[in-house]
Image (cartoon, rainbow, N blue to C red):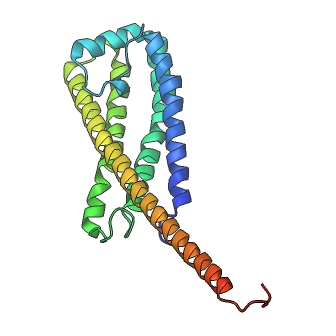
Amino acid sequence: MRFPPGRLVVGLLAVSIVLWAVMYFGTLAHLSAAAEGAQPFDLRPRGYSVGEARALLTMLGDAGRAYYADVQLALDTIYPATYALSRALAIWWLTMPGRLCAAPLAPALRWILIVPPVAAAAFDYWENSLIRKMLAAGPAVAGDLVHMASVATQLKSAAGAVGEVTMIAFAIVVFVRWRRRVTVKNASACRRWRRRCSCCRGSRRNRWPGSPP
């Protein structure tokens, strides 16, 4: 069996998606509601200014900042690792010889292709550490810290987007190639069946009169 097996890839993707859904529809939605509809730092792919960060920290209040640090960041400690592992293994599985194209991809290229999801996870952990510092500082957070956190958020978002687009595009190509192979195989089997039926009909017509059917 070639590593990774498809079931492992699907299982890790499912775990990653479930964790994302828990955060997006659960903890992050709770933080947005606590901040009067403002998006948490994690959901600002274009980053944020010093004024925007201070406004969010003010609207969250002490309870909201505590929830962000204790609940959301706790979940986001698990998610980046599952994200990187699931996407990297999915891309590795999709680029196995014969799946993405007839000729095998160079091993060096396959390693390069899994860099974006791994980098996204690294930037996510960096972002989390900076967000934790901003939450501890509160509305009086230093501008330099905000700028650094904003860069981490933007890098995480960019690397994650590249990883997602790569995985989805490869999955589409692999599915189309698989579908074509199945279609050709079925068509070939159908032609063989028709020829066999034609031979049977012909042999029956050529039998001597009175011979058993």
* 12 sits left or right of 136 in the view: right
In this orientation, which residue lies closer to the viewer: 8 or 105? 105
In this orientation, which residue lies closer to the viewer: 132 or 99? 99
Position in image of residue 203 (x %, y %): 64, 86
Q: Residue at x 47, y 11 (%)?
A: 34
Q: Residue at x 35, y 38 (%)?
A: 124
* 165 sits left or right of 75 in the view: left
Say above or below: 80 vs 37: below
Occupied quadrant, residue 192: bottom right
Position in image of residue 171 (x %, y %): 40, 52
The residue most toward the front is 209
Occupied quadrant, residue 154: top left
Q: Residue at x 20, y 19 (%)?
A: 143
Say above or below: 152 vs 67: below
Which quadrant, please, contains the C terminus? bottom right
* Camera sees residue 142: yes
In this orientation, which residue lies closer to the viewer: 56 or 18? 18
* Camera sees residue 70: no
Position in image of residue 16 (x %, y %): 49, 43
Position in image of residue 133 (x %, y %): 34, 26
In this orientation, which residue lies closer to the viewer: 58 or 204? 204
Q: Residue at x 32, y 33 (%)?
A: 127
Occupied quadrant, residue 126: top left
